[in-house]
Image (cartoon, helix red, strand yellow):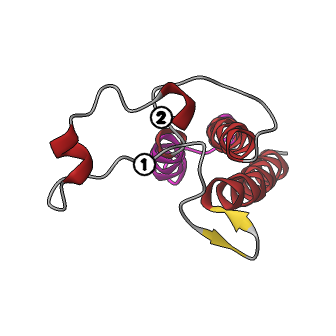
């Protein structure tokens, strides 16, 4: 889910290059804020700050997978969203996504402010 708002923000950014005004940068900020929020939610699930039962948490089990699915080296592997699969400097990928997405919110808001200044 964290990738979808990024795709929206990229599309908004492409359109914003051609269309002037603060509306599109504000939409980009909203998309970046959505993915930042999802990153915070995912980080909370990884760190057990809150308990959210979904199909990707270990507590719901792997009931939808067969033994062959679990042992397969050729197919996709089961990735649990409540377990950190990659971390750097003590922060998971979800945490980094949240931090960088909040930074993108600031960039989009700066673009909206610059658009307003140019129009004035």
Residue drawn 66% across the image and 25% down it: 52
Identify the image quadrant of the C terminus.
Answer: top right
Q: Tag on residue 79?
A: 1
Q: Magenta residues: mostly which secondary structure?
A: helix
Nearest the camera: 81 or 21?
81
Q: Position of residue 38 (x, y in %)?
A: 65, 38
SS category of the residue bearing label 1: loop
Nearest the camera: 102 or 42?
42
Magenta region:
6-25
Instruction: Determine the residue located farthest toward the bottom in the rendered image.
Output: 89
- Estimate the spatial distance between the alpha carbons at disc 2 and disc 1, rounded to whole Å: 7 Å
Left or right: 5 as drawn, with respect to 49: left
Residues at discs 2 and 1 in contact (Cβ within 8 Å): yes
Q: What crowding class fits label 2: few (fewer than 14 Cα within 10 Å), some (14-19), or many (20 or more)?
A: some
Residue of label 2 = 56
Nearest the camera: 12 or 105?
105
Left or right: 34 as drawn, with respect to 106: left
């Amino acid at each position: 889910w964290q990738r979808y708002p990024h795709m929206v923000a990229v599309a908004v950014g492409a359109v914003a290059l051609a269309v002037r005004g603060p509306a599109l940068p504000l939409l980009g900020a909203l998309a970046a804020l959505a993915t930042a929020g999802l990153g915070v939610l995912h980080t909370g699930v990884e760190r057990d700050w809150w308990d959210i039962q979904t199909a990707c948490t270990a507590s719901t089990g792997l009931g939808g997978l067969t033994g062959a699915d679990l042992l397969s080296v050729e197919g996709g592997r089961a990735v649990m969203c409540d377990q950190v699969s990659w971390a750097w400097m003590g922060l998971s990928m979800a945490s980094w996504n949240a931090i960088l997405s909040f930074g993108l919110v600031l960039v989009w808001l700066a673009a909206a402010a610059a658009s307003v200044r140019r129009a004035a």
